Amino acid sequence: MTKLETSILDILQDDCRLPLEKIAVMTGSSLEEVAGAIQDLESRKIILKYSPVINWDRTDRERVEAMIEVRVTPQRDMGFDAIARRIYRFDEVKSVFLMSGSYDLLVLVEARTLKELAAFVSGKLSPLETVTGTATSFVLKRYKEEGVIFDQDESDRRLVISP
Amino acid sequence: MNYQQYLNSRISAVPPSGIRRFFDLASSRKDAISLGVGEPDFKTPYLIRDAAINSLIDGETQYTANRGLPELRDEISLYLSERYHLCYRADSQILVTIGASEAIDLALRTLISDGDEVLVPDPSYVSYAPGVIFAGGVPVPVRTCQKDQFRLKVSELEKAVTSSSKLLILPYPNNPTGAIMEESDLLEIADFVRKHDLLVISDEIYSELIYDGHIHVSFAAVSDMYERTITINGFSKAFAMTGWRVGYACGPEEIVSVMNKIHQYSIMCAPRQGQVAAAAALRMGRENHYESVLMMRESYDRRRRLMLDAFLKMGLDCFEPYGAFYVFPSIQRTGLSSEEFCSRLLQEKDVAAVPGTAFGLSGEGHIRCCYATAVDKIEIALERIAAFVASNS
């Protein structure tokens, strides 16, 4: 990873709408160098998507989220990968992590209603043959995501002019 | 009752800071974007805050030693040795103060006798000249200018020095210009200092904020200047700790002990939790190679380039500042004075910048713009300044 690539990732993570021209100025590079580096980061699957952090609680969209701890039986030669793939293909599943500790997979699930979410757990996730148990916890409130604090006024508290 | 007769005439004669008027003006405009701040836009890293929180929970609410917590002085000694090749004894050569500001005040009061002249680069931080006057001295401005990248030149010092000169204030990286001094520049200054038998107060509060491969060289580490220098630094800029008010002075034991005499009678000690946080900042920095300082510096550097590029595209002369977090463009082509430019920019475009003259007469024709502000705000502010410049060209 070059210094330019690291700088570009830092800049995009903070604001992925920034034009290439500005990124070039900020990194002291040419437009072509920045465009090439971003293309390379995309092709190496380091940059996967340009996505905003949304506070859905401030919208009128109905939404239920849950974190499901899943215990599974790992499969010969495939470990946890095969079952993880089966789980992450469901549209309801937003993230899947292999975890150390008392359970194996952490599955973040989103649905429109509680009923839909319950149907997913009981109808799709639990019946998978290698799943030996689940524990579902509902998200009640988001405080911080992707480094962005949701519930606090983060306004600038500095004096407008200081020496 | 006429209080004027009771007031100290020396202090009454000093005019209020030129920044004050702009503070009042800018504060009245709620939607203004301010490029007029003089502090980081980061909060103190949480692990540093956490150290102070734990100290409070543990009931550490007592005075500390006058000179500061021994563990903090040990950390400062290690830090200066590791970063700037300076060797100061924690027990006798380091004094922890309420911000670098107190350290400057103590140094001036310790060294100046009535009528002593003090050479002060112009433009510079607003407190030096008043501090000299409060201590009974006479500040003598030493012009710096854009063609020299606002570096202090011996030719200008020679014009200002007299037989009454006792002290030189050396504030680099510089507020408001963002200028730095390379080692070769400092060697010339060292010759001048030796020739005129001066002492030096080297205010290095922005020492960690230096960009583009340049390296901060501490004046006390240059040639034989150690014995002639009081090094002043602090935590406000490098660790985003402005509100904690912790700084320090280091120097010859004979000078630091007199500074400590004033400090112990007037202050007692810097607040304990600030000192605990400062010690944590240095300890963690030592352990993780100053990760948070590096992260903040890189972030400032990107915004420095952005702002410099925008001013050059507006057609304003602007030297590349390699230090602090200020850009100091020339606004002379608009035909406006610094004050007029900033007043009208605020009133017509809702952008606050500080007129260069707030930092000394040599700041005329320039404005100070701070890039320690969110990129989106910087961009809007720069667009507004560009429109303002275009309509006044």
Image: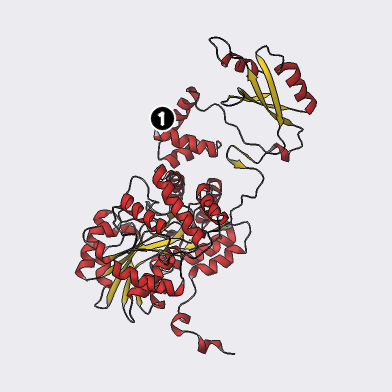
| Residue under the point 40% across and 74% down | B262
Along the horizontal axis of the image, is B268 left or right of B182? Answer: right
Along the horizontal axis of the image, is B163 left or right of A118? Answer: left
The residue to which callout 1 is attached is A1
Looking at the image, the residue that sits furthest to the right is A115
Residue A73 visible: yes
| Residue under the point 29% across and 55% down | B86
x, y percent for residue B267? 46, 71
Tag 1: residue type? Met
**Element assignment for label 1:** loop
x, y percent for residue B67? 40, 65
Residue B207 position (above or below residue B301): below
Colouring style: secondary structure
Q: Quadrant of residue B178?
A: bottom left
Residue B160 position (above or below residue B40): below
| Residue under the point 33% across and 56% down | B149
Task: Tell me the quarter of the image containing the N terminus of chain A.
Answer: top left
Q: Quick one: A159 or B376, which is closer to the camera? A: A159
Residue B128 visible: no
Which chain is disc 1 placed on?
Answer: A
Residue count near mark 1 (Cα–Cα under 10 Å), binned few <14, some 14–19, many ≥20 = few
x, y percent for residue A25? 44, 41
x, y percent for residue B381? 54, 52
Residue B326 position (above or below residue B22): above
Q: Quick one: B154 or A55, which is closer to the camera? A: A55
| Residue under the point 62% across and 64% down | B28
Along the horizontal axis of the image, is B345 left or right of B213? Answer: right
Looking at the image, the residue that sits furthest to the top is A76
Q: Quick one: B15 or A56, which is closer to the camera? A: A56
